[in-house]
Amino acid sequence: MPTDRAEQFAAARTLMVMIDEMIDGALLVDKDVRIVWSNDKHVWFNDKLMAQLGFQSPADAIGQPVERVIPHSRMREVVETGRSMPLDIMRYGEHTLLVSRLPLRDEQGEVIGALAFALKHSLTYLRPIADRFNKLQSRLNRVEQELAASRASKYTVENLIGFSPAMLEVKRLVRRAGQIRSAVLLLGETGTGKELVAQSIHAGSDRAHRPFVGVNTAAIPENLLEAEFFGVAPGAYTGAGRQPRPGKFQLADGGTLFLDEIGDMPLPLQAKLLRALQEREVEPLGSNKVVKVDVRIVAATSRPLAEMVRSGAFRPDLYYRLNVFPIQLPALRDRRDDLEILASLFSERVALSLDQPMRDLTPPALDRLRRHDWPGNVRELANVVEQVYVRTEGDRITAEDFADILPGAAPDAHLGRSNPSIAVADGKRPLAVAMDDLERSLILEALAGCRGNKLEAARSLGLSRTNLYAKLRKHGIPVQPDD
């Protein structure tokens, strides 16, 4: 170290010693941001910390980069910019410190290092500011955690309920979609669970730890779509904020962007979306700078995109970009085998939300559900079950409970509340009763084969454990804990 520079550091050390009673720790670094001196009573260099860092004493830290001792130190910023930081509240372990940082210069004005010191007893006088800082920091951390949780995937392929051939094929395709990085296009009527499938694809991909961001194109006014997708630069238009507002592409960077109802996107925005997908960059509204983004696209629509391409209502180049891995979601009327398990699941959820006992569906009630066409698909079924709970009473859900809910649902004579065990005139049992008896015998057989283990029995029957317990109650089979 040159003699004049050593003298300058010595002068700084002398100054720190003189004001020792006013400070709670001082630190000097050189132009390489390596520690060259610290006072003996340094708050950052306690014995416990030294031991954790592998130092026998504070003297061992001399010559080390400052970040090795103080991971979040801003001394490097002071040395590199030459700007002082007169007051800064710093969190260090269990301490909250009021720190001043100043650059050290030679006679030519060149930065040769920096000085930092923590003011002694400063927080006693600045306690209200420190408390407010701590509260704001805690609130910020909580908001960031909640925001991260809200953008995480809530569903996996296990949440796709159903064992019909159509649903088994959907599950196979969803698992395959999670293994690839190409765009996925979900096709299906409204209410078939497209967002649930999109989140399941994200959860099964290598982007599962990154954000899942969804945007419903049909729910946003056309004049706001561009800002919603690509973000807004400060002062881009009258009323725009002073801070940049990121768009959905920036929020989903590294993760998955779910474009719901893509068929409702206006043609001008389709061109900009296509460019963003091809170039992997977006240009915020009112900005001349492009922002690089890395997103995996999962799009969905209930509209016939192929026909819209032929009629000119949807860009063919964007269609080909999105339609790499199409998945057709079946309508509920095409998977009626799943009606019972879905209805039982919704019954359990509604009962839990209303804090009521769960009501099983009688065989005639299930027959009534199977005869309905379900134009609203799974969403409509969930709504119907909830209506039954709030509009009717009873231990079980019967066909009569749908009389004022489903069109044409007035129960037939053999679907009423009469005793289902009564045989018809020719001595044969009604189909619903025969199916009920068959189901009961299959459950008993599965339980016997699994030695009473409910979980194994449910798996062998293709049911969830919850659904199996509901059927045990329906058929009056004793429910006991598994061995």
Image: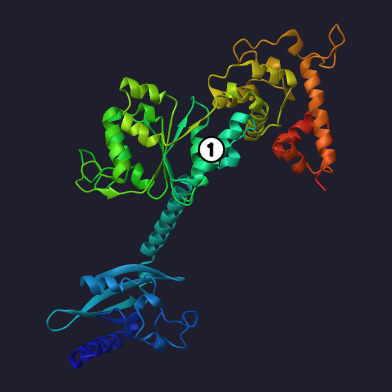
Identify the residue shown where x is 64% and y is 28%.
338
- Residue 475 visible here: no
Q: Residue furthest left?
A: 108
Q: How far across and how far down the image is residue 155, in percent?
A: 54, 41
Q: Residues within 10 Å of mark 1 (few under 14, many from 20)?
A: some
Please state, as top left, top right, bottom left or bottom right, where the N terminus lies in the image. bottom left
**Residue 472 in sight from this viewpoint:** yes
Q: How was the colour assigned to the protein in this rendering? A: rainbow
Quarter of the view holding residue 231: top left
* Residue projecting furthest to the right: 427
Q: Is residue 71 left or right of residue 222?
A: right
Which of 59 and 354 lies nearest the eye of the viewer?
59
Instruction: Provide residue 291's location: percent of width, then percent of height.
Output: 27, 49
- Give percent across and percent down for residue 105: 18, 80
Using the image, determine if residue 124 lies above or below residue 296: below
Q: Is residue 265 above or below residue 201?
A: above
The outermost residue toward the bottom is 3
x 39%, y 25%: residue? 306
Q: Quadrant of residue 238?
A: top left
Of the pair 58 and 257, the residue shown nearer to us: 257
In front: 158, or 327?
A: 327
Q: Residue at x 74, y 22 (%)?
A: 362
Determine which residue is flagged by label 1.
173
Between 127 and 334, the one lying in front of the other is: 334
Q: Secondary structure at mark 1?
A: helix
Task: Please state the horizontal and vertical placement of residue 356, each as a whole percent of the image.
Answer: 68, 32
Identity of the residue drawn at 76% across and 11% down: 414
**Quadrant hosting residue 103:** bottom left
Q: Is residue 239 left or right of residue 404?
A: left
Q: Amino acid at mark 1?
A: Leu
